[in-house]
Image (cartoon, rainbow, N blue to C red):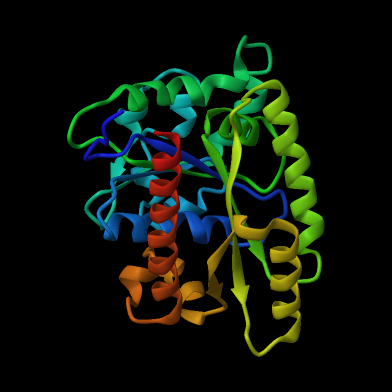
Amino acid sequence: MPNSPIPALRVLSISNQKGGVGKTTTAINLGTALAAVGQRVLILDLDPQGNASTGLGVPRQKRTTTIYDVLLGERPILEAAVETALPGLHLVPSDADLSGVEMELAQVAGRSFKLRDALAALRADTGPDRYTYVLIDCPPSLNLLTVNAMAAADAVLVPLQCEFFALEGLSQLMRTVDLVRGSLNPTLEIQGVVLTMYDKRNSLSEQVALDVRSHFGDKVYDTVIPRNVRVSEAPSFGKPVLIYDLKCAGSQAYLKLAKEVVARERARQTQAA
């Protein structure tokens, strides 16, 4: 099959059932970095807290159409997408209404596939301005939203904080991926594990990194995201860190990660061709 100048859409669920590991931070800043290196990216804020929406500078009063409307089938996904400060990066925002979606869909047939069905229009798009990546920022729990994300995704990207309980949380996630693969999405794979909040002054960070690499080998990205105050500050200004402070260590790490993600995807597509 000939290579296309624009790669096929790749949907990545950014997931970890443990909270505070950097899922939203990774979704925002990896998405921004991918757009900065020439990809067209859509971020789906699938967390009722709406932190990805806030971190990308979309205030609550401007979230007139959200992922909630998409999941209920009331709006197509492209109608819900809004522009961000970076060309090539769009967002489908979230708000507190999303917390009720599980109850509203409880008796609906095919409720686990609502997001997959909504993304079908993006997968069918062959135009020059089509998206090349969809990043789904998942809530820190196994609920209908996370199941929808994994049922819709090609692969799971796992942010993993360099702390003592990291591997315990990762083992729970792997069990979830196996369950989804067995019942809803047989082609779901682990795209990669990214180590976050790495502190080179802390021997525990290094030990966790070594343990994770020994368990998962080349599934772990070479790039690590350092603990960096500029990364922590940026969301309060409604900006990705690459826009807030391009030169800081966190921004440079996310740019490096984006290039590694793209390189892995190209290698995967070459092997599949």
**Which residue shows up at 50% across the image and 24% down it?**
116
* Image quadrant in which the N terminus is located: top left
User: Is residue 255 toward the left or the right of residue 189 in the image?
Assistant: left
Identify whether 186 is placed above or below 138.
Answer: above
Residue 222 image point, x, y percent: 54, 68
- Which residue is at the front of the view, 92 or 13? 13
User: Is residue 13 toward the left or the right of residue 80 in the image?
Assistant: right
Q: Quadrant of residue 110?
A: top right
Identify the residue at the far left of this view: 128
- Which residue is at the front of the view, 59 or 126? 126
Residue 75 image point, x, y percent: 37, 22
**Which residue shows up at 39% across the image and 75% down it?**
252
Residue 93 visible in the snapshot? no
Q: Quadrant of residue 130?
A: top left
Residue 244 visible in the snapshot? yes
**Which residue shows up at 44% across the image and 26% down it?**
69
**Which residue shows up at 17% across the image and 35% down it?**
128
Residue 140 image point, x, y percent: 67, 48
